[in-house]
Amino acid sequence: MSRIISPSMLSADFGHLARDTRMIDASDAEWIHIDVMDGVFVPNISFGFPVLKAIRAESSKFMDTHLMIVEPERYIKRFAEAGAELITVHVEAVKELRPALEMIRACGIKAGVSIKPATPVSTIADCLDAADLVLVMSVEPGFGGQSFIPGSVEKVRQLRQLIDTQGTGTLIEIDGGVSAKNAALLFDAGCDVLVAGSAVFKAENPQAEIRNMLNARIDQ
Ligand code: DX5
Ligand code: ZN
């Protein structure tokens, strides 16, 4: 199992986007998390292609793109062209999951599926072979800075078991309320990738916070 940190640019200072992107680029985070919200699937609007391209221009990290939009199928190709290397769609937002994942892979990039806190793991169990990653939302999608929903840990454990039984090698990512305080527990439950927005950008030393997350151990 891998240990990857994916800082969420939603919590960056948009007045200094290039500076914050370069700061993440110089950190031990392997990925960079891009939250796209349309104000329909979630009650908030974040940003779209121009901002994504601006981040892409300053970053050589693996671009992890989380689409919180309705009918994501309509925009997959454009996000791939804008530099996304992984596109994650919500199972609650797609018309049909498998074709949506296939559409992403057909762009030559990785395909992810996300589940909201109330969506059970069973809804995606028959598509794990078509998914490179499952993103477990540990807050209601829409805003940074919310508290981690504890029941999410059990969902990660269930998923870990399913993925290991099916042998699909699908990565597990968790997003919402993640920090160095719960990183050890989440890696231990079976997460490969931790997304963190406010924990990183509000830290006095964001790069140290990323290191602390990577090195977190249960017995600490
Ligand atoms: C929320 C987004 C998250 C958000 C996480 O809908 O998907 O990626 O940026 O923010 P924190 O880490 O502050 O909970
Ligand atoms: Zn996200």
Image (cartoon, helix red, strand yellow):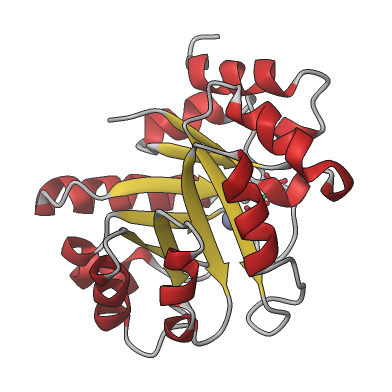
97 relative to 174 in the view: left or right: left
Q: Residue at x 42, y 83 (%)?
A: 73
Quarter of the figure that contains the N terminus: top left
Q: Residue at x 82, y 32 (%)?
A: 202
Nearer the observer, 73 or 155: 73
Image location (x, y in percent) of residue 80:
42, 65
Q: Residue at x 49, y 87 (%)?
A: 71
Q: Residue furthest bottom?
A: 95
Image location (x, y in percent) of residue 121:
35, 64
Please say whether residue 21 is visible from this viewpoint.
yes
Nearer the observer, 188 or 53: 53
Above or below for 65 versus 130: above
Above or below for 110 versus 28: below
Q: Residue furthest front?
A: 57
Image location (x, y in percent) of residue 204:
83, 20
Nearer the observer, 63 or 133: 63
